[in-house]
Image (cartoon, rainbow, N blue to C red):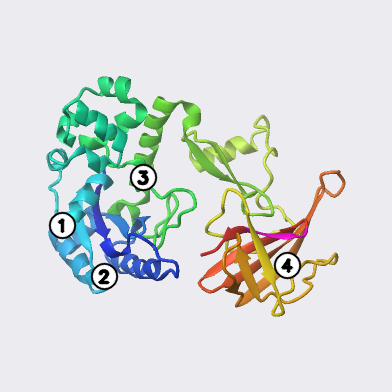
Amino acid sequence: MNRLLVVRCPDLLVPDEDGAVLRLFAEVVETTGAFCPWVTTVAPGLCSLPVRGPARYFGGEEPLVARITEATAALTPVEVGVADGLFAAVLAARGHRVVPAGGTPAFLAPFPVAVLGRPDLAELLARLGLRTLGEFAALPESHVLGRFGADGVTCHRVAGGRSGELDELHPRPGRRTAGRRTAGRGDPVGEPEFWGGVSDADARAGRALVAVQELLGPDGVLTAHLQGGRGPAERARFVTWTGRDEQNEQNEKNSPTSGAGTDPDPGAPWPGRIPPPAPAVVPPTPRPAELADPDGRAVAVSGRGLLTTVPHRLSVAGGPWAAVTAWAGPWPTEERWWTRSARRGARLQAVCGPAAHLLVAEGGRWWVEATYG
């Protein structure tokens, strides 16, 4: 289990509408990144970094905590702590603690089971007379699996310090990570072996995913797969995680018996596809929108693929109007024109204050297909 340092910003845990909180938190992440390139944004107001390498460089864990606290406290009130695993490190940060290596089970034991964030589980454990993490961790795992299921086992392992993470501590689809530097296998950026970065994280993640598949079955773990397409939602699909590295997958894809060609080629030309960078957030279904010119007339796309008037303001899902400060496009698309299910439309990028949206026009209406920030 990886040893982590967590920086928690109590005043930045809830984002505001104008994005000021997230921008300030991005400064905290950037400042923390001066001590280690492998800073991961866990959630708004909460980030972590592997402590092994930086602690060696800065003379130990406590000096490292002191340096990061001093640097980030100049921006906003912070709580910094160190422990084995993300769950324990968050609790250590809330108490400004540096938990000794191997001391996580004893550190967690006195905490109430409510800190697991499972109200139903906590209530049931209380009825059984089990009110602390230590008492819960003392149960045999086989009994926990039979009584509380797979989620109960996850909580049981975390409570005993044998696993470091709960699901809600991971960024979920639709969230962004800020200030994180990433590198592929063999990428020298950030010296991953020294900093405890990609190589160790891949191995830990692989072991965790194998354990999840043992509990939920082979289809219980999915991974995103990039494919060809015009819209951002079309370019990603979820496939069953197999644990194979990218080279093995590429070799299998190129094999004569692999059924190559079943996925749209992401490198092929796709007329109407938007230019990079890709949007940050893609909602499950597009949201209705209205686009108007300075005189309040609706903006449309002509049969020649041109805007009928200049975009001036935008309303999303019936919300308040926001001024359009910049826009690009449109990019017309025509799909399956040879069939009865033919689709014609156009995409437009529109900037409204701190946010930028990807709009799509279909059937005489505008929709927000994705958001950049």
- Horizontal and vertical percent for residue 168? 36, 45
Q: Amino acid at mark 4?
A: Pro
For the question of whether residue 60 can be seen, the reply is: no
**Mark 2 crowd level (few <14, some 14–19, many ≥20, 10 Å Cα):** some
Q: Which labelled disc corresponds to residue 330? A: 4
The residue singled out by tag 2 in the image is 76
- Whether tag 4 and tag 1 are in contact, CB under 8 A, the answer is no
Q: Which of 270/306 is in front?
A: 306
Identified at 18% across, 40% down, the residue is 112
Q: Amino acid at mark 3?
A: Glu
Marks 2 and 1, the one that precedes in the sequence: 2
Q: Which labelled disc corresponds to residue 96? A: 1
Magenta-drawn stretch contains 286: no
Write the start and end of the magenta stretch as one range. Answer: 364-368
Q: CA distance from mark 4 to mark 1?
A: 52 Å
The residue singled out by tag 3 in the image is 168
Q: Secondary structure at mark 4?
A: strand
- Whether tag 3 and tag 1 are in contact, CB under 8 A, the answer is no
- Whether tag 2 and tag 1 are in contact, CB under 8 A, the answer is no
Q: Amino acid at mark 1?
A: His
Marks 4 and 2, the one that precedes in the sequence: 2
Q: Secondary structure at mark 3?
A: helix
In the displayed structure image, the side of residue 370 where residue 171 appears, left or right: left
Identified at 62% across, 37% down, the residue is 253
- Horizontal and vertical percent for residue 163? 27, 37
Q: CA distance from mark 3 to mark 1?
A: 22 Å
In the displayed structure image, the side of residue 181 where residue 235 appears, left or right: right
Marks 3 and 4, the one that precedes in the sequence: 3
**Mark 1 crowd level (few <14, some 14–19, many ≥20, 10 Å Cα):** many
Q: CA distance from mark 2 to mark 1?
A: 15 Å
